[in-house]
């Protein structure tokens, strides 16, 4: 936000001025109004503790993060390039496996990944869009934008992008107008268009359904919100059945065919006949209907193999391999502890590195070296030696910070952002993102389950 | 529409109607606590409990003799009926369930409806009886109004899809069952009282029928006239006849369900309940028995509606 101490970047000048000149009470009132609007509208996520489930609100900071249109364009081009390569990778890895045979990615990195689904071998996907909805975690360092993680399974957070926008826009109307902020509210329309483009052949006016695990899922609000936005039925596994290779939902007028399922249920639970047998969330026979091309699942099963933390290290190579281009977005330098030299380096530099378990997400199973205690490092050292293939390590990044309203004054906090890339017949992105913020001072963990919150991202045309 | 969604909005309608009905009963009764006799207060509590088919926390021997006890006990009883989590029909439980159904079916209702209901829920969430006991009638009145507002917003903003019909069907069936239950409680308990008119004016207020009664019959309260008005007057929105007709009209507006047999049975039951009130009521010798038949009919209607549209067998269901 600042080029030097106290000197804002050009596009942040209006925001800085507004923050400086606004009386404390006014900022406090705006913040209160933003928080209250979330509570009143029931924009919540569910937290489970024992038998109890509690609806909670993601803390929202009313001060927006700003990017220029030029910065956004650079990011957008990088994201489109990356998702193109990832979709080609998925088609390849469940097809001819050229990338493995050509020695770009070791076979064991792919096969050892628990998200690799042999059941998907030989399956072709409409428009080759294995990943229809991708939520890429981006951080910004002094080296520019970097991809922290590709979320290719059931990425969430887009409803908060829209809710944050609505709440913050209402609180900062004049500033919003001055900054000529790009709109994000058409995300639902684009998502519907994307899903429609992926419908089975011959289904010109496809019937859409959003498959949710149910009301107790932490992202249920988002499922409901998106179903409403795209005009889809919000279904649970119990509402669907497969008959003669086609998927139907139970309606008050009988069984109605479903053409496209935007599924927000993990692969494991999708079809008890193929994946986890004890799943009550899925639909028996769904994968068979999918393989016969009678229904589209977005995202396709098995996409998790491409956002695995070990496979992540190879994404720049995928871009070069499939697109013959240099990656526009950088990866964070990643060491795979399955390699002896990387393991040794990691063990020697634990206090400087971030170590992540490949199968974990949400900030769990992670050691942030500089913030860790000697005991925690010893514990990780043991785990690393016991199962090195399950870990990767990365340098601790100097993440960019953005001002947040803390105790009625602006204080810097670390932020990342998660833009959403939609891919049907083509890739589309709304100019905005779910911007996550580590609300605890000095913290680098932005996950909402670990003290993180959200803020609005403004792409400004200044 | 999705069967589970239809079921959700149907139950949302039922629970919110229950919360509103009980709030209205309690609003009128706590007003009576100020200046009515102990006998009347006890009668009122008994009537509410019988309507809700529930025993008071201390069982049947809860009736104290002195006013002080009555007042102290009123607090406990109001708490049991208002905030008691283990009472599935308390105002809180009904509102919470209605709101939970609305939360799950937010995509079927309008944003304005959800916001209105969620605010009512948030207002009540952290309250206890002690917080409302200085002016309990204001609390119950506000709760009634909030649900009235919700219904008004539904009227003004909700798309007239099947969801709208199922919500209104749920409201109508719940209204019939509660009204029958209250009328039976009044007649059965009233028989044991020395003052035969005890409670009948309250019955009129409960159903927003005092003005209509005065206009039709003057100021003298006669139980048989009150009964006629509450049961069979087609112009009184809260009469049994109006509610049964509303249920039948909603059912008529919903497309035929996949279980044709259950669908036809549901429509017959709604018609039969209406016919009982319209044609049998004026000549019925045993009106309590007739009310019980209407009650059974609407309970069957509830089950048959679910059979026809939600729990139907898939073997013979049409594919679309």
Image: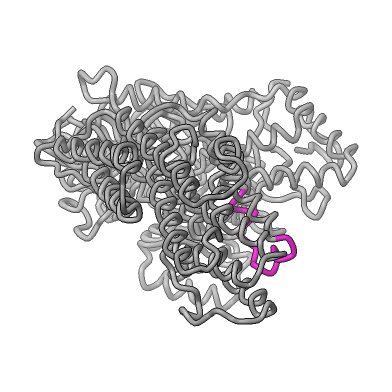
Exactly how many numbered labels are in the figure? 0
Q: How is the image coloured?
A: one colour
- Foreground residue, B232 or B160? B232
Q: In this image, A16 relative to A176: left or right?
A: right
- Foreground residue, A216 or B296? B296
Q: Which of the image's four quarters has the N terminus of chain A?
A: top right
The residue located at (62%, 41%) in the rendering is A140
What x and y, as percent, mark residue B244? 36, 39
Q: Is residue B130 magenta?
A: yes
Prevailing secondary structure of the magenta residues: helix
- Residue B187, picture quadrant: bottom left
- Residue A160, picture quadrant: top right
What x and y, as percent, mark residue A108? 26, 53
**Stretch in magenta:** B120-135
Q: Which of the image's four quarters has the C terminus of chain A?
A: top right
The residue located at (22%, 25%) in the rendering is A200
């Amino acid at each position: 936000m600042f080029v030097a101490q106290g000197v804002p970047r050009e596009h942040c000048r209006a925001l800085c001025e507004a923050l400086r000149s606004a009386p404390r009470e006014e900022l406090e009132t705006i913040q209160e109004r933003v928080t209250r609007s979330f509570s009143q509208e029931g924009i919540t996520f569910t937290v489970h503790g024992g038998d109890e489930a509690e609806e909670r609100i993601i803390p929202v900071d009313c001060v927006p993060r700003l990017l220029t249109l030029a910065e956004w364009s650079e990011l957008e081009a990088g994201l489109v390039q990356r998702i193109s390569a990832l979709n080609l990778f998925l088609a390849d890895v469940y097809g001819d496996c050229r990338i493995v045979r050509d020695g770009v990615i070791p076979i064991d990195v792919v096969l050892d990944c628990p998200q690799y689904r042999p059941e998907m071998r030989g399956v072709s996907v409409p428009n080759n869009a294995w990943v229809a909805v991708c939520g890429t975690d981006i951080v910004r360092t002094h080296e520019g934008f970097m991809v922290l993680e590709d979320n290719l399974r059931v990425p969430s957070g887009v409803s908060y992008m829209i809710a944050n926008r609505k709440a913050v826009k209402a609180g900062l109307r004049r500033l919003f107008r001055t900054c000529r902020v790009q709109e994000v509210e058409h995300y639902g329309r684009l998502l519907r268009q994307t899903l429609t483009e992926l419908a089975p052949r011959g289904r010109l006016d496809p019937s859409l359904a959003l498959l949710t695990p149910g009301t107790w899922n932490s992202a249920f609000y988002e499922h409901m919100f998106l179903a409403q936005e795209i005009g889809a039925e919000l279904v649970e596994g119990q509402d669907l059945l497969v008959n003669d290779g086609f998927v139907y939902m139970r309606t008050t007028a009988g069984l109605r065919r479903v053409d496209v399922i935007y599924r927000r249920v993990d692969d494991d639970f999708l079809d008890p006949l193929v994946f986890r047998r004890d799943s009550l969330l899925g639909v028996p026979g769904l994968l068979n209907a999918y393989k016969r091309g009678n229904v589209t699942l977005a995202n396709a099963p098995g996409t998790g193999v491409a956002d695995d933390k070990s496979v992540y290290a190879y994404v720049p190579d995928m871009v070069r391999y499939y697109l013959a281009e240099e990656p526009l977005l950088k990866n964070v330098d990643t060491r795979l502890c399955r390699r002896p030299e990387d393991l040794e380096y990691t063990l020697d530099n634990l206090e400087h590195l971030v170590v992540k378990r490949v199968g974990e997400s949400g900030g769990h199973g992670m050691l942030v070296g500089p913030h860790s205690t000697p005991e925690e490092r010893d514990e990780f050292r043991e785990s690393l030696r016991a199962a090195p293939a399950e870990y990767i390590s990365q340098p601790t990044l100097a993440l960019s910070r953005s001002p947040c309203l803390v105790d009625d004054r602006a204080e810097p906090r670390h932020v990342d952002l998660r833009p959403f890339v939609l891919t049907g017949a083509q890739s589309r992105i709304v100019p905005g993102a779910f911007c996550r913020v580590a609300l605890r001072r000095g913290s680098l963990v932005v996950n909402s389950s670990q003290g993180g919150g959200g803020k609005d991202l403004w792409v400004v045309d200044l | 529409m999705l069967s589970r969604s239809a079921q959700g909005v149907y139950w949302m309608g039922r629970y919110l109607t229950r919360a509103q009905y009980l709030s209205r009963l309690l609003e009128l009764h706590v007003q009576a606590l100020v200046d009515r006799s102990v006998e009347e207060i006890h009668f009122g509590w008994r009537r509410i409990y019988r309507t809700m088919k529930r025993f008071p926390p201390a069982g049947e021997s809860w009736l104290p003799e002195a006013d002080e006890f009555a007042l102290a006990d009123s607090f406990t009883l109001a708490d049991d009926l208002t905030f008691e989590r283990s009472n599935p029909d308390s105002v809180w439980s009904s509102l919470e369930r209605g709101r939970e159904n609305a939360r799950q079916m937010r995509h079927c209702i309008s944003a304005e409806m959800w916001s209105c209901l969620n605010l009512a829920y948030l207002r009540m969430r952290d309250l206890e009886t002690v917080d409302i006991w200085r002016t309990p009638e204001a609390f119950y009145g506000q709760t009634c109004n909030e649900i009235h507002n919700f219904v008004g917003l539904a009227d003004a903003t909700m798309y007239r899809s099947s969801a709208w019909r199922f919500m209104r069907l749920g409201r109508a069936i719940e209204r019939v069952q509660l009204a029958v239950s209250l009328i039976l409680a009044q007649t059965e308990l009233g028989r044991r009282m020395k003052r035969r008119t005890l409670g009948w004016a309250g019955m009129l207020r409960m159903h927003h029928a005092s003005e209509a009664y005065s206009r039709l019959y003057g100021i003298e309260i006669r139980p048989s006239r009150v009964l006629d008005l509450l049961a069979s007057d087609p112009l009184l929105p809260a009469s049994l006849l109006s509610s049964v007709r509303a249920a039948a009209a909603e059912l008529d507006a919903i497309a035929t369900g996949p279980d044709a047999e259950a669908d036809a049975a549901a429509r017959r039951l709604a018609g039969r309940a209406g016919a009982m009130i319209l044609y049998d009521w004026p000549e019925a010798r045993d009106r309590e028995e007739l009310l019980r038949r209407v009650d059974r009919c609407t309970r069957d209607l509830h089950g048959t509606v679910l059979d026809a549209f939600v729990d139907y067998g898939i073997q013979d269901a049409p594919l679309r």
